[in-house]
Image (spheres, rainbow, N blue to C red):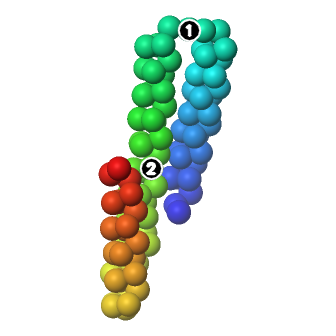
């Protein structure tokens, strides 16, 4: 993983961690359910953005390297991994 992507993802995850703590506090304080659900939705969206960033970097580095290598076995492996993870993230 490129360092700039790692740094960005870690910063985002730290903010998400704070969001999750905030949601826990909202529950402890018996806050309005719709407000809690709204915050959960926001946290989920933030996690999706981190996921997309990491996947984009994976394609730009690992998959691209496999394609450039000319190694058919490695190419098939990387494409298979990518397809598997994409099918899981769509659920």
Name above or below for residue 66 compared with residue 16: below
Mark before the other along the chain sequence, 2 or 1: 1
Residue 59 position within the rendered picture, expressed as x and y whole percent measured from the top left: 37, 66
Residue underneath mark 1: 31
Mark 1: give few (<14), some (14-19) or many (20+) Cα within 10 Å. Answer: few
Q: Residue at x 34, y 83 (%)?
A: 76
Q: Residue at x 37, y 67 (%)?
A: 84
Residue 61 position within the rendered picture, expressed as x and y whole percent measured from the top left: 43, 69
Name above or below for residue 74 compared with residue 64: below
Q: Of residues 37 and 12, which is closer to you in this image?
A: 37
* Label pair 2/1, CB-CB below 8 angstroms: no
Residue underneath mark 2: 51
- Marks 2 and 1 sit apart, C-alpha to C-alpha, by 29 Å
Q: Residue at x 50, y 8 (%)?
A: 32
Mark 2: give few (<14), some (14-19) or many (20+) Cα within 10 Å. Answer: some
Figure quadrant of residue 28: top right
- Local SS, label 2: helix
Figure quadrant of residue 81: bottom left
Figure quadrant of residue 71: bottom left
Q: Is residue 17 left or right of residue 66?
A: right
Q: Of residues 40 and 6, which is closer to you in this image?
A: 40
User: Which numbered disc, 2 or 1, marks the residue closer to the eye?
Assistant: 1
In this rendering, does residue 80 appear at all? yes
The mark tally for this picture is 2
In this rendering, does residue 60 appear at all? no
Residue 34 position within the rendered picture, expressed as x and y whole percent measured from the top left: 43, 13
- Local SS, label 1: loop
Q: Residue at x 64, y 9 (%)?
A: 29
């Amino acid at each position: 993983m490129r360092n700039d992507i790692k740094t960005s993802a870690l910063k985002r995850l730290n903010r998400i961690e704070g969001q999750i703590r905030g949601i826990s506090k909202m529950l402890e304080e018996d806050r309005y359910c719709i407000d809690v659900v709204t915050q959960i939705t926001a946290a989920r969206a933030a996690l999706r953005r981190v996921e997309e960033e990491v996947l984009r970097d994976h394609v730009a580095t690992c998959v691209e390297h496999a394609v450039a290598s000319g190694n058919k076995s490695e190419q098939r492996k990387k494409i298979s991994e990518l397809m598997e993870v994409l099918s899981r993230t769509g659920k």
